[in-house]
Amino acid sequence: MADAKGTKETKGTKGPGKAGGPAPQAKGKEKAKGGGATDPAPKAAEGKPRLQAYYEETVRGRLQKQFGLGNSHEVPRVAKIVLNVGMGEGAKNPKSLEAAAEELATITGQRPVITRAKKAISNFSLRAGVPIGCAVTLRGARMYEFLDRFINVTVPRFRDFRGLPTRSFDGRGNYTTGIKEQMVFPEIDYDKVERIHGMDITFVTNAGRDDVARALLREMGMPFRGEVPVQVN
């Protein structure tokens, strides 16, 4: 009987190890240390974007000296960039709207917001609340990264490009430009494009004046028509 109890006790000691004792937890910790897991909330970029560092080190001092600003906090800066895609067929063809939203997310690296009609217009067969497009608002590191790619990669891909127009300021220091085809962005795959569409890109600044905002964008490298663009190092 004693031998039988001893054998049962020895078998019982082995059971907890199989059911989920310390041994499997140790294996789990070793597996986690192996580097197979991914970051559930990845950052926009590691470190400070190149264009943001250039603005803080070079552009800010130039603008302060050019306009005679006594306080460094008065120097204008780019507050946000808004990309807007209008899809009038969004209600009738929701797949095209989904494709446009996916392309916008690929371009910006941020999930877009579906815009809906605020009013019902009978002439256009439009009802209130119907999805009519998508939009993305970029701030911080992603904004500077997109601005850097837009100036140095996307704009040179424009067909017959002779510079961006200088009459697209709204009188309050905000600049808006339109793009006819989304395929000018290098992130878009030609084979996956279902429908060609354009978009509006608005660069919102806190300048308050068009001449100050134009000087800000010029120093950031924006190639305006009739001007030699500034080389950003």
Image (cartoon, grey):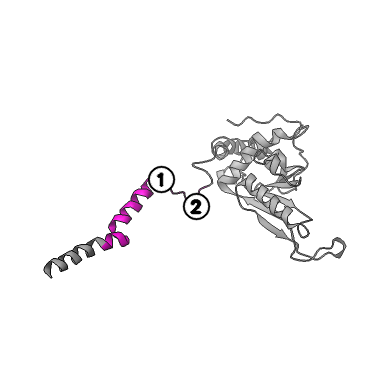
What residue is drawn where x is 75% and y is 42%? Answer: 181
Residue at figure coordinates x 87%, y 62% from the top left: 123
Assess whether residue 20 is covered by the magenta stretch. Answer: yes
Where on the picture, by quarter, is residue 50?
top right
Q: Residue at x 78, y 41 (%)?
A: 167
Disc 1 residue crowd, few under 14, some 14–19, many 20+, Cα 10 Å: few
| Residue in the foreground of this view, choosing between 27 and 112 | 27
Q: Residues within 10 Å of mark 2 (few under 14, many from 20)?
A: few
Instruction: Give the vertical position of 215 relative to 12 (above or below).
Output: above
Quadrant placement of the N terminus: bottom left
What percent of the width, then of the height, locates residue 226? 76, 31
The amino acid sitting under disc 2 is Ala
Tell me the residue that label 2 is attached to. Answer: 41
Q: In the image, which residues are magenta?
A: 15-43
Majority secondary structure of magenta residues: helix
In this rendering, the answer to whether 140 lies above or below 119 is above
Looking at the image, the residue that sits furthest to the left is 2
